[in-house]
Amino acid sequence: MPDGTQVPDGRRVVVVGASMAGLRAAEQLRAAGWTGAVTVVGDEPHMPYNRPPLSKEVLAGKAPFDSLAFTPKASTADVEWRLGTKAVAARLAERAVDLDDGTTLSYDGLVVATGMRPRRLRCPGPQAGRHTVRTLADAQGLRDELTRPGARVVVVGAGFIGCEVAATAVGLGVTEVTVVDPLPLPMVGPLGPLLAHALLRRHEERGVRFALGTGVAGFEGDDRVTGVVLDDGTVLPADIVVESVGSTANVEWLDGNGVDLADGVRTDEWLRVGGRPEVVAVGDVARFPNARYDGVPRRVEHWSIPTDTAKHAAKVLAAHLADGGGELALAPFAPLPTFWSDQHDFRLQSFGAPVLGRDDVRILDGDPDGDVLVGYHVGDRLVGVVALGGHAVASKAARYRAELLKQPALSVQGAVK
Amino acid sequence: MKVVVDMNKCQDHGQCVFAAPDVFSMDDDGHLLYVADADDALRDEVEEAADVCPLQAIRIED
């Protein structure tokens, strides 16, 4: 098949995925000295934009698209953007990517940045009225329905996105908002029961209802959803359903290359894919071992990860393309994860890996009825801190960040599967 | 180097403080303080701060 855009000097890096990770990869390739061509392919029609406001400010009508779009660095002015175009296959042995417009891009280096898509519930019932929140189009579509007077909302999934959407809906004046989850508490998986109890209480005090310990059996309605059927047969009346039940990695286009694609793209500690030094993965599709912890490869869906992975992977790829296989003078990838979540009038701020220390949670400051700072431990080692409350307690969490950064790698015995 | 923070966007996350502690800091209430006229030697740090700002509220104007 002919090459869609032959690069004059023949040296090109193709970045597949035009969200934050793809943009940061392009920028960091330039920062790492790559002067060849860069082509970024993305299936959405938009230039890269910031996604966290989708479940909050965009739903609330406070953030137009202009305020979400990243401002690309001047160094990327000559990057070619192929937007509204999807990669459908890769032939890594031939260093070629096939696009859905029929063209093929050959490359010297490939950056995998295709991210995630929302998982959907597979239940019987109508489709209309069911939403996810991943893209700008998703958020705009949901906002149009949320602002109809008298809308009743059921959010399926009590994770961070589901709880943010529920809080935003209440803030918009929606009076019936119910969050459904098979687990007994919201956000209990990543945070453990101590904070999850505190979060449940805060949400209930602000008007969010919960149906916990139950799954969804189906949806009622003919043309569109009128109710959500729970496992025990109870029906929650609903005009709008938001499905926030996790996500699936966009990796199908890499099938057939012998790459480990079980839950994202498996990388080595330098973010390289399939033993190929010219292929790296960045962002939340990358399943990488973190040398800071136990070395078990994991995907990490935090906002900080696209930038962290892009910096590391771009150095690795640029070094390979510059000298074609010299020694890599770079430490293994060992980011300190960080995330936040804004819900109602409070913020969760996390540093480190609380999920590894869920079985030993200690209050470091405050109490769960007010602003509280908790530490997560493996043995006596602090592995993560989470603040819940206002700005002042988030600042206190930040003081523990230096301690988390100083610690040596976690021993494998201390590892949590 | 002129550092500009859009204070309508800033939500006091403090990620910039880790990236560029010579330019950004938080007061005791957890609100952002910053040096608008920063030394050019700190450009890399401030670029890093702009990258990691969750609200993308930081700009460098030469």
Image (tube, helix red, strand yellow):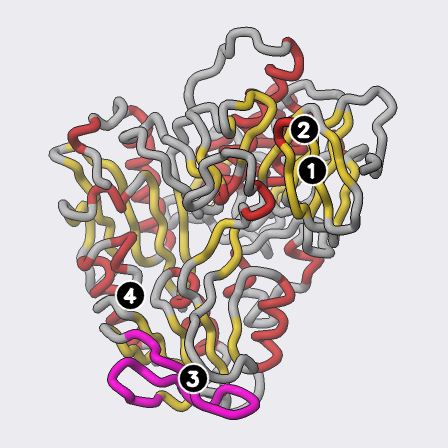
Q: Which label belongs to residue A97? A: 1
Query: The disc labelled 1 sits on which kind of residue?
Result: Val
Please determine whether, in this image, residue A319 is positioned above or below residue A239: above
Please determine whether, in this image, residue B31 is positioned above or below residue B59: below
The chain that hosts pointer 1 is A
The chain that hosts pointer 3 is A
- Do marks 3 and 2 share a chain? yes
User: Mark 3 packing: few (<14 Cα in 10 Å), some, or many (20+)?
Assistant: many
- Front-most of residues A288 and A176: A288
- Front-most of residues A264 and B1: A264
Instruction: Identify which residue is drawn at 53% across, 36% down.
Output: A282
SS label for mark 4: loop
Q: Position of residue A87 (x, y in %)?
A: 67, 46
Q: Can you tell which of label 3 and label 1 is closer to the viewer? A: 1
Which of pointers 2 and 4 lies earlier in the amino acid sequence? 2
Residue numbers of the magenta segment? A215-235
Could you give the CA–CA distance between mark 4 and mark 1, rounded to whole angstroms? 41 Å
- Do marks 3 and 1 share a chain? yes
Q: Which residue is mark 4?
A: A186
Q: Can you tell which of label 3 and label 2 is closer to the viewer? A: 2
Please determine whether, in this image, residue A221 is positioned above or below residue A68: below
Q: Which residue is mark 2?
A: A95
SS label for mark 2: loop
SS label for mark 1: strand
Query: The disc labelled 2 sits on which kind of residue?
Result: Arg
The chain that hosts pointer 4 is A
- Do marks 1 and 2 share a chain? yes
Location of residue A291 (image quadrant): top left
Q: Is residue A43 left or right of residue A379?
A: right
Query: The disc labelled 3 sits on which kind of residue?
Result: Phe
Q: Position of residue A366 (x, y in %)?
A: 19, 53
Could you give the CA–CA distance between mark 3 and mark 1, rounded to whole angstroms? 40 Å
